[in-house]
Amino acid sequence: MIITCSLMLGACTDEITVNCPTHTLERAVQYDGYELAWAEEFEEDGLPDDKVWSYEEGYQRNEELQDYKKADLSHSRVEDGKLLLHAFKDPHDGTDGMGAPYHFEFSSASVKSQMKKDFQYGRIDIAAKIPTGRGILPAFRLIPTENVYEDGYGEIDIMEYVWGDEDEHNSVYQTIHTQNTLDKVDERPASSCSSNTLDSKFHLYSVVWEKNSIEILFDNKVVLTYQRNQESDSYKQWPFDQPFYLTMNLAVGGTQGGKWEIDETVFPAQMEVEYVRYYAKINNGDSEEKDDEDKEGKTVNLIENGDLETAYSDTEAPVIVPRWKLENERMLEYRNRWNVLEGAGTEFFVDDANGANNTKHSLSFKSPKIPNWWSTDVGLTFDGVSVGKHTLSFYVKSDKPVSSFVLSFTLADVSVKDYRNYKTLANENGKTVIKQGSGSLYPTMLEYVGNTWQKYSITLDIPENDLKDGLVRLVFKPHTTGEFGATSCKLVSSEPVQFWFDEFVLEKAN
């Protein structure tokens, strides 16, 4: 089982503050490898479409205080292209789920797609503006439609908000539940991310559900990853090979929401959902052999020893080198060997006690003082990269609460003296373009990083080129910032810093 908190490529914004900094929300309507299969755009005013949505009713769970109302326009309705769910301070008597008398302090709504619109694999996007405050608990969840495992449980919590213990009280939480986590056989995969505009701006809450992995995203940035255990293949660890339905609810109080008591001034509370969109994967390939898989059906990683778990010999180990040794064909002497430019006090090594996803090894860069941004290059040159779409992913963390790095993905030409003049691939508006170097590298990625492992990923469409053997070079600049389209960068600071990198994967994309 692999559990991670992570982010993906994006451009920074001052409007969102996050435990792992997030970026400008892009309302993508197209994703590589997926096609839009179904969408609920909430176009007709009135009650939610009964061909898609039904309701939870009355008391439901967790000692919550709300009475869920069915088909009640004051609690759930479509208006001006949005689904509105309302919660009210509304003391009244009713019955609980067993029919016993129950006093409700609040009334609210919960809609669900059970037996009307179910999902299995693919990507789900929910654009929403949620209420915040002490005692309110909005949530988006995926739950098995008809659980096929009598003694197994599964649930995907795409978003839950609670007041929380942090000072800002603006975090949303993501959780994956299985029978193994319920029985405490496995640690429960969970993460959180924060924004000070949850209740004032629409954000994108997403899940990408594959046959062997689940990723939960906030504003298109991965914040939680969970993977199938290929060795055990137990439904108690992976109960996600079955249809699930979506619930969207606005709860009040209870064992979770009421932990910090309830601020009655937040009522009436309103949640707005702009749309729900479901993207199915194109050509799942269940019965066809894919070109990018080896004979055992495993995806080929073009980066050798990308997880750093195989021991290096003395001539393969990460090395500190002067820049001149990486010029022209001399660079080929370091093919498939991680290297960093020499600097006073620089350390570059495999850390054998600090790997991502509970592994044992990672690549570490450590410096007592980085003199300038152009001397931070951590690089790897390798070949065998063909023309076409490829996805690069990796994990990074720093010893700082917040730092950043710049990555350049370059087409390596040994006839060019200085690799800073290589052709750099950049992602502009979803399209891969070539930037010709002119003394330094253009950024392919600009990202923030914290002191916990985070996953980063980018897909590039490598164009036709005349470079021999598909030679490329990755260059990371730790503790450095920059701008897309510019060749110069700047240091975050010159103070002592340490970075760790792990789980490098470059594979052909679908």
Image: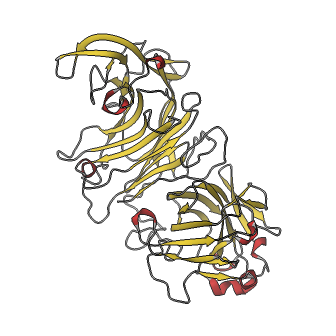
Viewer-closest of 275 and 11: 11
Q: In the image, is 339 to the left or to the right of 316?
A: right
Most extreme residue toward the top, as rendered?
A: 92
Residue 472, above or below 144 = below
Q: Pinpoint residue 376: horizontal percent, then vertical percent.
A: 69, 70
Place of residue 267 in the rendered image (x, y in percent of width and height, measured from the top left)? 46, 17
| Residue 51 visible (yes or no) | no
**As drawn, is 185 to the left or to the right of 406?**
left
Residue at the spot x=42%, y=55% of the render?
Answer: 284
Q: Residue at x 25, y 45 (%)?
A: 153
**Can see residue 438?**
yes
Observer-nearest of 212 and 226: 226
Query: Is residue 139 toward the left or the right of residue 171 in the image?
Result: left
What's the image's color scheme?
A: secondary structure
Q: Is residue 502 above or below residue 153?
A: below
Q: Position of residue 350 (x, y in %)?
A: 51, 76
Q: Position of residue 57 (x, y in %)?
A: 29, 20
Residue drawn at (75%, 69%) of the image: 371
Q: Nearer the viewer, residue 285 or 266?
A: 266
| Front position in the image: 252 or 130 | 252
Asked which quadrant contains residue 65, the reply is: top left
